[in-house]
Amino acid sequence: MSNPDAPAAELVAEIEALGARLGEAKASIATRIIGQQEVVDLALSAMLSGGHALLMGLPGLGKTLLVDTLSTVMGLSANRIQFTPDLMPADILGSEVLETAQDGSRAFRFIEGPAFCQLLMADEINRASPRTQSALLQAMQEREVTVAGEHKPLPAPFHVLATQNPIEQEGTYPLPEAQLDRFLVKIDVDYPDRDTERGILLATTGTADARATRVFTPEELIRAQGIVRRMPVGEAVVELILDLVRACRPEGEEAPEIVRKTVAWGPGPRAAQALMLTVRARALLDGRLAPSPEDVAHLARPVLSHRMALSFGARAEGAVLEEVIDEVTARVTRIGLAA
């Protein structure tokens, strides 16, 4: 007779082994990225969840270095695209060129664009035109591109880490809501504190540059993503995710007064899916076997802030979306724990 506890024990062993490997990966990343632990954890959570991340931060805070380090540590092929207003879809996806063979015959040959990689850095993504952004949208959502009527799959795994500069808005195009929703998390990259900046100063102005080492392979990352999806989630955490997402919709019956007064539109079901995945990834990165309500509260801002918008009146009165999310999260969490 088979042991019913065997599958559970096997999953626990896989989670613990993956947690140890992720500890090695974080140690390797820390050789080049000093501080910014929350940023690193969120980026890893997005990759473990199989999603994309939008990094918001001022120039010079290490966003490009982070993507380069992640590609090395996770063993992924990486490309970088500097988005500009004159960038065309073919500059991202690739194009077909007409070639003439030695015998005089002519045929079209497809030349792959930089999107054909496993980790794509889209630098200053909001500088490209909506037409170019729509080409990237298909790649992000469907993991394939369409060129000359033919569907061409992208390598697996495929992740986009995009950066956006919040202060230089001249010559930019706002990202469409549909594209923002495709980013699993929005990561705010802030200035380092004094001690961290001192460490950066000493580590980066010497004669030797720190080198990260590869810890994962693409196949191992895909297997890790499968383990994340198999990680158990308690009923209380599931209900808390649903309560939080539904409370952030101003037209819903479960919305508190602050949401009805300040929010123009709220998050859709994809936000709940993103929370369900990222809380598992965060628990895994912390060495735990299952997510907790604290994980939901911790990830509310990164998952929800780019899937909501304040009304014009709320912005005029100086309301801050992140503060609204914090208040709703605190309220829902109290109710959930009391229940």
Image (cartoon, rainbow, N blue to C red):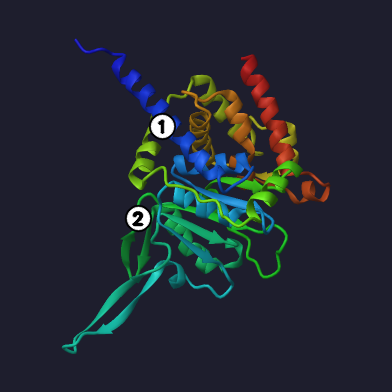
Q: Which residue is tagged 2? A: 155
Residue occupying the point 60% across, 62% down: 124
Residue occupying the point 74% across, 32% down: 257
Residue 11 visible here: yes
Q: Is residue 321 above or below residue 4?
A: below
Amino acid carrying mark 2 in the image: Pro
Quarter where residue 305 is shown: top right
Question: What is the distance, in whole Å, between disc 2 and disc 1 at their CAs?
Answer: 23 Å
Residue 310 disc label: none
> In the shown orientation, is residue 84 left or right of residue 235?
right
Foreground residue among 86 and 18: 18
Residue 178 visible here: no
Quarter where residue 117 is shown: bottom left
Residue occupying the point 39% across, 37% down: 224
Secondary-structure class at tag 1: helix
Q: Which quarter of the image is occupied by the C terminus?
A: top right
Residue 167 coordinates in the image, percent (x, y): 73, 60
Residue farthest bottom in this picture = 104
Secondary-structure class at tag 2: loop
Amino acid carrying mark 1 in the image: Leu
> In the shown orientation, is residue 132 left or right of residue 93?
right
Q: Which quarter of the image is occupied by the N terminus?
A: top left
Q: Which residue is tagged 1? A: 18
Residue 271 coordinates in the image, percent (x, y): 54, 40
Residue 181 coordinates in the image, percent (x, y): 54, 49
> In the shown orientation, is residue 174 left or right of residue 110?
right
Residue 230 coordinates in the image, percent (x, y): 38, 29
- The crowding category of the residue bearing disc 1, from other C-alpha atoms within 10 Å (few below 14, some 14 to 19, many at least 20), is many
Going from N to C along the chain, the mark reached first, 2 or 1, is 1
Residue farthest front in this picture = 207
Q: Is residue 111 above or below residue 238?
A: below
Q: Is residue 127 above or below residue 20?
A: below
